[in-house]
Amino acid sequence: MIERSIVTELEGIVGKDRVLTSPEELAVYAYDGTFYEGRPDVVVMPLSAPEVSKILQLAVRERIPVVPRGAGTGLAGGSVPVHGGIILNLAMMNKILEIDGVNSVAVAQPGVVTGDLQNAVEQRGLFYPPDPASLKQCTIGGNVAMNGGGPRGLKYGVTKDYVLGLEVVLPSGDILRLGGKSIKNVTGYSLMQLFVGSEGTLGVVTEVTVKLLPLPKARSAALVVFPSMERAAGIVNTILGAGVVPSTIEIMDDTTIKCVEAYLRMGLPLDVEALIIVEVDGDETSVASQLEAVAQICLENGARSVTRATTARAIDEVWLARRSVSPSLARMRPSKLGEDISVPRSAILPVVKSIQEIGRRNELTIAVFGHISDGNLHPNILFDRRDPDEMQRVEKASREIFAAAVGFGGTLSGEHGIGLLKREFLPLDLSPQVIEAMRAVKSAFDPHNILNPGKVFPN
Ligand SMILES: Cc1cc2nc3c(=O)[nH]c(=O)nc-3n(C[C@H](O)[C@H](O)[C@H](O)COP(=O)(O)OP(=O)(O)OC[C@H]3O[C@@H](n4cnc5c(N)ncnc54)[C@H](O)[C@@H]3O)c2cc1C
């Protein structure tokens, strides 16, 4: 419990109306997108970097844990205050400070919702490509902290590929300005990138400068049905080998297809092993030729059917199945554990087969879907948390899935991060020396371990 005098000091920094202490208000900040739970002692909503700086200095002085929070959509337990303390809610720092068309950059406060940033730059003919499925809720600060990605990863990369500048407040209270609007910058260590993906454990991001691209003039999509998973998994390299780089290739396995069809009844085939969605973008002529090339390649390589979508409405319909995966899976069993492994493209087929085998061996339903073009797969285990025997099998299966991913040259997480969910599995992926080097970085920036304690590192 935090003493009343500390709350009064916090109120002195940000004002009374931006400090929350009632049990009802605190309960709202006890969760993220996982099943972890942890009640904060107080929620503070700063409006500026100097306010964040004062809050962190107070927290260091009193050794109070501070958990930065954007929208709380994280899927690793990262913003859950398991040790209580202060939730630093950055959602009110939500202004787009500048859209600079000459330099093709945008400058935003951390609480700007990613989708709002995308819409704002698109109105100026510009494009911010990173597209987490949560973009209508998650914040740009949360994306930087998690190095968020999305379906467009293969062609356009992820958040780290767009961050040009950051303002970060350290636990010491120091406010660092790193990078800026220059595309190239190799002055000193690449400290800025260290904060991208640091999961709120090294510093608090209070301003983000991102690179923008010209907005593609057109896009089209195709829904492709593959009777064989083997042919579906191999199609990415065939498409790339033909010189076409789609903006997106998503895959759904047979379990996922069945769950979506049970939910939507949209006529998806139930006798096939995989379905993929391919999207291409560019100028109108190139989009038409890319779509035709993709359709031909798929049909020549084992696809049963290709549904082409060239209007905004038709593209939206093609995406409906993929967009509905999470709600379709959620209604099958009381609990769902979404993993986020990432493997080299060549390992997609063996890793999918391994996951299916892990499901059979542990008598669990595991649906596999994800961003096949960049090797980032989301095996989702469906189960009931109240059943201790099933919980044990889920934990065993998770470990086996991670081991399979690492065994095939992949990694524990492609975009959701480690947080609480995967911290005990870190040694499966990283050597003791690497973990020790990371711990040294953590203690250099946060010697008193007040910033998001208990996250990322194994106990
Ligand atoms: C339905 C659904 C779909 C999703 N799809 C995707 C997807 O396609 N791709 C993807 O990458 N993720 C996805 N996610 C996960 C999540 O949306 C991302 O991790 C996102 O980047 C989190 O942003 P947030 O603002 O909600 O951050 P939060 O959940 O509030 O915080 C996440 C982490 O970032 C830290 N943090 C937040 N803001 C700051 C800051 N300003 N400074 C320092 N640290 C900070 C927190 O301490 C925490 O550790 C999905 C989540 C859901 C619920």
Image (spheres, rainbow, N blue to C red):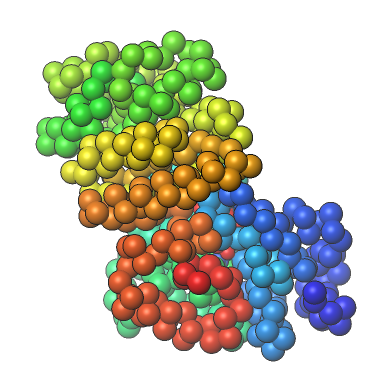
Q: Quadrant of residue 40?
A: bottom right
User: Would you say 96 lies left or right of 214 here?
Assistant: right
Q: Where does residue 206 sit, x and y in percent of width and height?
A: 58, 69
Which image quarter has ligand 1? Answer: bottom right
Whether residue 238 sits left or right of residue 70 in the image: it is: left
Vertical position of residue 29 compared to residue 50: above or below: above
Q: Nearer the viewer, residue 91 or 301?
A: 301
Vertical order, 342 against 358 (above or below): below
> Where is 290 relative to 8, above or below?
above
66 relative to 197 in the view: left or right: right
Q: How far from the left and from the top, in percent, is residue 238?
A: 14, 32
At horizontal 67% and vertical 70% (from top left) the residue drawn is 83
Q: How many marks?
A: 0
Residue 255 picture quarter: top left
Q: Is residue 285 visible?
A: no
Residue 121 is situated, as x and y percent measured from the top left of the image, at 49, 47
Q: Report the front residue among 66 and 312.
A: 66
Residue 79 position in % (x across, y down): 60, 60
